[in-house]
Amino acid sequence: MQAAANIPAAAPSRRTEILDGLKSTLPFMVGAAPFGVIFGALAISEGLSAFETMALSLFVFSGSAQFVAIALIAAATPAWVIWLVTFILNLRHTLYAATLVGNVRHLSVGWRFILSAGLTDETFAAMEDRYRRLGVHRNSHWAYLASIVAMHVNWNCWTLIGIAVGSQMSGLDGLGLEFAAIATFIGMVVQKLRTPGAQTAAAVAGILAALLAALPYKAGLTIATLVAIAVAVIVERRIEARRIRA
């Protein structure tokens, strides 16, 4: 009996991993729904065509970057500034990738490229929790892929609905969609501020963004983001150093 107890359980099948990946991601899909509708409607109200709006969701696939991009496009901001700002906003994904890399290091370059290209806040949250609870199995990356595909399809479907809403309604600027987008961001961010580094970064970013709001081309947002990232890294490293010394 003791020998039998030491035999490792068989790895879950590919189908099981896919279904579990979808299950883990479902709450995030529901949470992203109003966000996608707001983006689609707001992009149309800012003068983007349905094709341009869908292209952003299909190829950029980053809520925060897309909202900032349409604001910059509406302000006739140079393309290089838009690219720079969205690049900086998405730098957090390098931290996500660094956290998950140990779980996908054994995969081929092709697999790692696909998984890294599709990584979002929601998929990271779902997969980080799943890897922490269940560890890595032979087919774990299929759960990861299922999460990416589910979020991508979900985001684009709700964007399309938002486009339909925005195309059928006039005067959307008066409906407070900008405020709704900001409120949605706040709701998403606050629940993730669980570490001193993240809390400090949020405070620094908020203060600097407010103080530098008058700068052209949303430069204040860019500066606030870079400083907040640096501060978060410093705080987390100091906390880790204290733990090691203790």
Image: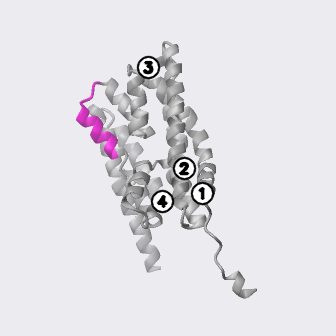
Gap between marks 1 and 2 measured at Cα: 8 Å
Gap between marks 1 and 4 measured at Cα: 34 Å
* Residue visible at 50% across and 30% down in the picture: 159
Neighbor class of circle 1 (other Cα within 10 Å; few <14, some 14-19, many 20+) is many
Q: Is residue 148 left or right of residue 133?
A: left
SS under mark 2: helix
Q: Label 4, on which residue?
A: 196
Question: Front-most of 55 and 10?
Answer: 10
Say if residue 178 shows up in the picture. no
Mark on residue 45? Answer: 3
Label 3 or label 1, whichever lies nearer to me, is 1
Label 1 or label 4, whichever lies nearer to me, is 1
Q: Is residue 19 left or right of residue 161?
A: right
Q: Earlier in the sequence, mark 3 or mark 1?
A: 1
Gap between marks 2 and 4 measured at Cα: 32 Å
Q: Label 1, on which residue?
A: 17
SS under mark 3: helix
Gap between marks 4 and 3 measured at Cα: 38 Å
SS under mark 1: helix
User: Would you say the residues marked 3 and 2 are in contact, meaning their CB atoms lie under 8 Å apart?
Assistant: no
Q: Label 2, on which residue?
A: 146
Neighbor class of circle 4 (other Cα within 10 Å; few <14, some 14-19, many 20+) is few
Image spot of residue 201 (x, y percent): 41, 52
Seen from this angle, which residue lies furthest right? Answer: 1
Q: Main secondary structure of the magenta part?
A: helix
The answer to whether residue 54 is magenta is: no
User: Would you say the residues marked 1 and 2 are in contact, meaning their CB atoms lie under 8 Å apart?
Assistant: yes
Q: Which amino acid, by three-letter code, is at mark 2?
A: Ala
Q: Earlier in the sequence, mark 4 or mark 3?
A: 3
Q: Which amino acid, by three-letter code, is at mark 3?
A: Ser
Quadrant (top left, top right, bottom left, bottom right) of the N terminus: bottom right
* Residue visible at 43% across and 70% down in the picture: 240
